[in-house]
Image (cartoon, grey):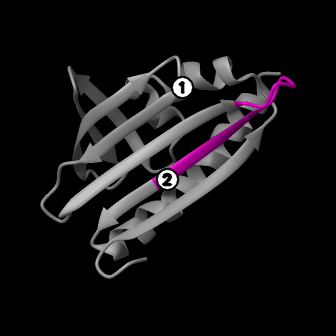
Amino acid sequence: MNGRRGSVRYEKRIDAPADDVWELVGDPARLCEWFPGIVSSAVDGDERVVTTATGLPIPERLLTVDPLLRRFQYRIDAPMFHEHLGTIDVFDLGDGTSLVAYSTDADPATLALLIGGGTAGALDELRTIMESRN
């Protein structure tokens, strides 16, 4: 963390091909399938609204959905954030496995820590889902 801004990144190796992982991660409407606590994900153009299990809607702006790089980036557009950037990268490790990195940068820093905790759990769930398909 640096002053008001915080940054958190988690990585998880998954025993599944990167293209298969990207098929799930790269579809903004499918977030609720692998992110615990998110019950719906509605996409309209470059806008997405995710709804938490408590009923809280979180508006987001989709910034990057790049199937060549396997990179997904979004920004939370909620008043509690001065600034936010979420980035998910899926890397092909060349042996039929992949590495997924999920980073969160936010101002205020406490929200980066809060979201970061959720992203760690999401990567665990993603790995469980993907490895059960093999």
Image coordinates of residue 8 in percent, x first then y, are 50, 64
**Residue ranking furthest to the bottom:** 3
Locate residue 77 relative to residue 5 in the image: left or right: left
Which picture quadrant has residue 78? bottom left
Please tell me how crowded label 1 is: few (under 14), some (14-19), or many (20+) other residues with Cα within 10 Å: many
Q: Residue at x 43, y 56 (%)?
A: 104
Which picture quadrant has residue 126? top right
> According to the image, label 1 marks what residue?
70
Image coordinates of residue 98 in percent, x first then y, are 74, 32
Q: Is residue 76 above or below residue 73?
A: below
* Number of marks in picture: 2
Which quadrant is the C terminus positioned in? top right
Which quadrant is the N terminus positioned in? bottom left
Q: Is residue 44 above or below residue 35?
A: above
In the rendered structure, which amino acid carries the disc numbered 2?
Ser
In the foreground, 49 or 82: 82
Q: Are marks 1 and 2 in contact (CB under 8 Å)?
A: no
Q: Residue at x 30, y 40 (%)?
A: 50
- Label 2 residue SS: strand
- Label 1 residue SS: loop
Please tell me how crowded label 2 is: few (under 14), some (14-19), or many (20+) other residues with Cα within 10 Å: many
In the rendered structure, which amino acid carries the disc numbered 1?
Arg
Image coordinates of residue 52 in percent, x first then y, are 34, 49
In the foreground, 127 or 112: 112
> According to the image, label 2 marks what residue?
103
Q: Which residues are magenta?
A: 92-103
Q: Residue at x 66, y 19 (%)?
A: 20
